[in-house]
Image (cartoon, rainbow, N blue to C red):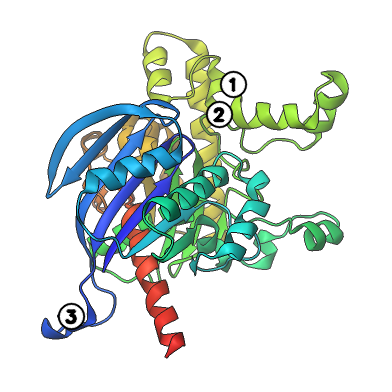
Amino acid sequence: MNILVLNSGSSSLKFLLVRYPSSEERADEGQSGVERGIPLVRGTIERIGGPATLAMVADGIHKPVGQREVLDHRSAVEWIVESLGSPLVEAVGHRVVHGGAWFRDTVVIDQTVLEKIALVTDLAPLHNRACLATIEAARTVVGAQIPMVAVFDTAFHRTIPDHAATYAIPEEWSMKYGVRRYGFHGIAHASSAAAYAGTLGRSLKGTRLITVHLGSGCSATAIRDGCSIDTSMGFTPMEGLVMGTRAGDCDTGLVGYLARHAELTVEQIDRLLNERSGLLGLSGRWSDMREIVRAREQGDQRAELAIAVFCYRVRKYLGAYLAVLGGADAVLFSGGIGERSPLIRARICEGMDWCGLRLDEQKNSAAVTLPAGSAVCISPNDTTVPAYVTAVDEETWIAREVLRCLQRKEREAQ
């Protein structure tokens, strides 16, 4: 089965075409279960909404980057399908950021599923709209008869216990409006844990991990036995760590204060906290950590403060999750910043010797480019809580979830 994975962002679209052998082929080779698929092509379209670029990798070879005007996600999907050429697509998997209270597992998309995803768009406005646009585009371009499957970021966090997921608010709000900690980046956290387990050749059963996913959006998760038991993002992707443009943890009294004294509407405050805060608000100029690090090196004090606040917040969550888990077997860094910034990893881990978390300077500096789905240790060999850099592979994880969902649906139909 050829599965096309579409992982949509607000202005980008990652894709992977992967082939899984049929049951007959598995039988011939003596295989069983959900084995590894064969990646055929993967790539990314960036800067949707204007002159966009397409980069592809096939058979380990990077193809030249193409460029064209891509005004929306439908045009992006058309470009991807056109670029793939002749391979038959038999199913399409979509990453959906927020599944609300309805979806606790991967599901085949129908009209009811689309309507429910649309109902929680306000809780993840930067993401769910792009997801819905990509799904509609795929149905048109690939064909409505091809199974479409939704894989939810929130589903991985369904195992968070009630005492960690429940806010201390009137019960009516929780029951009537579904207010609780849903958690996000679930696919990335699951993929990070899988990369660690696969690299070390160990089961996640009996393992305690703290995964730290740092990119434009940032979150930390406490994982026991392969299951999420707490995470920094909550009802929306706004809570928790400092992010590119999102404030993260913030006093809820700030909203009322700004509404009264700055004469801002709730919508204006929400937009400012989502789009003008975080690293951008702290530095005054940049949401990209690479630019902030460069500015710090040139003596920019606001850039230094942005880095200090960012790293301090992550360190606070590391300490909290060490308490939640009763210790940890490893700390895993992932995401654009987590995978590629030795400086930020080192700043986060400063002063963590008390719990056995230390970095090896040489190993840390060398870990900047990893193959997708792999992990590398950046701590000394004798460290009791080693740190790893993990190169998450969300698209492969989504593909496996799609296959699992379709196989389950096939069994239920028999």
Pointer 2: what residue? 245
Q: Nearer the viewer, mark 1 or mark 3?
A: 3
The image quarter containing residue 179 is bottom right
- Give the x, y percent position of residue 239: 63, 43
Work out whether residue 75 or residue 406 is closer to the camera in this orientation and state it: 75
Q: Is residue 126 left or right of residue 353?
A: right
Q: Amino acid at mark 3?
A: Arg
Residue 94 makes an appearance in the image: yes
The image quarter containing residue 256 is top right
Asked if 258 appears above or below 88 in the picture, the reply is above
Neighbourhood count class around disc 1 (C-alpha, 10 Å): few under 14, some 14–19, many 20 upward: many
Q: Amino acid at mark 2?
A: Thr
Asked if 349 appears above or below 411 in the picture, the reply is above
Q: Which mark is residue 26?
A: 3
- Give the x, y percent position of residue 408: 42, 80
- Give the x, y percent position of residue 18: 25, 59
Work out whether residue 32 or residue 192 is closer to the camera in this orientation and state it: 32
Pointer 1: what residue? 281
Question: CA separation, marks 1 and 2?
Answer: 7 Å
Q: Is residue 216 left or right of residue 182?
A: left
Q: Is residue 411 left or right of residue 131?
A: left
Residue pushed farthest top?
299
Q: Which is more N-terminal, label 3 or label 1?
A: 3
User: Is there CB contact under 8 Å for labels 1 and 2?
Assistant: yes
Residue at point 36%, 32% (across, down): 46
Can you say which quadrant of the picture contains the C terminus?
bottom left
Q: Which is more N-terminal, label 2 or label 1?
A: 2
Question: CA separation, marks 1 and 3?
Answer: 53 Å
Identify the element where label 3 is drawn.
helix
Asked if 391 appears above or below 187 in the picture, the reply is above
Q: Is residue 394 left or right of residue 158?
A: left
